Amino acid sequence: MKRTRRITCKKYLRICHARGSPGPQCCKKKCVNILRDRLNCGKCGKKCKYNDICCKGKCVNPSFNSKHCGGCNTRCSNGQFCAFGMCNYA
């Protein structure tokens, strides 16, 4: 039986910079974007909690974070609060 070789980023780091790659960093032989990947948030292997998402390399809860309300970089206006992913929900 003929074995085929798998090209991984562990050996060929440039593969992560190719067009269509999920991200420019290599974590556990996979290309990832550590600024958005929930399983590698900010650095390889750092997992976000169940309700959190990865925004700019930090785990945040989009349900209650006024800087990332409902999603990454969705800010509530000055004085507004974030509840259940919506600004000034009441």
Image (spheres, grey):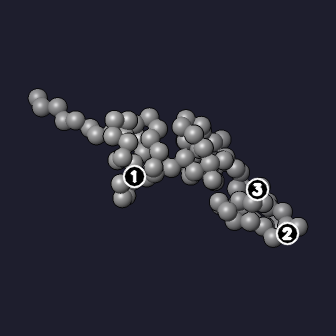
Q: Quadrant of residue 20?
A: bottom left
Whether residue 34 can be seen here: yes
Q: Which residue is mark 2?
A: 78
Q: Secondary structure at mark 2?
A: loop
Amino acid at circle 2: Asn
Q: Is residue 90 visible?
A: no
* Label drawn at residue 17: 1
**Is 8 left or right of 51, judged from the image as shown?**
left
* Label 2 CA crowd tier, 10 Å (few <14, some 14–19, many 20+): few
Question: Which mark sits nearer the N-terminus, 1 or 2?
Answer: 1
Give the labeled residue for mark 3.
Answer: 65
Q: Secondary structure at mark 1?
A: helix
The type of residue carrying mark 3 is Asn
How far apart are the alpha carbons under marks 3 and 1? 32 Å
Counting from the top left corner in percent of width and height, residue 53 is at 63, 50
Mark closer to the chain start, 3 or 1: 1
The answer to whether the residue labelled 2 contacts the one labelled 3, judged by CB atoms less than 8 Å apart, is no
> Which residue appears at 42% of the width and 45% of the height?
31
Q: Residue at x 85, y 69 (%)?
A: 78
Q: Tag on residue 4? A: none
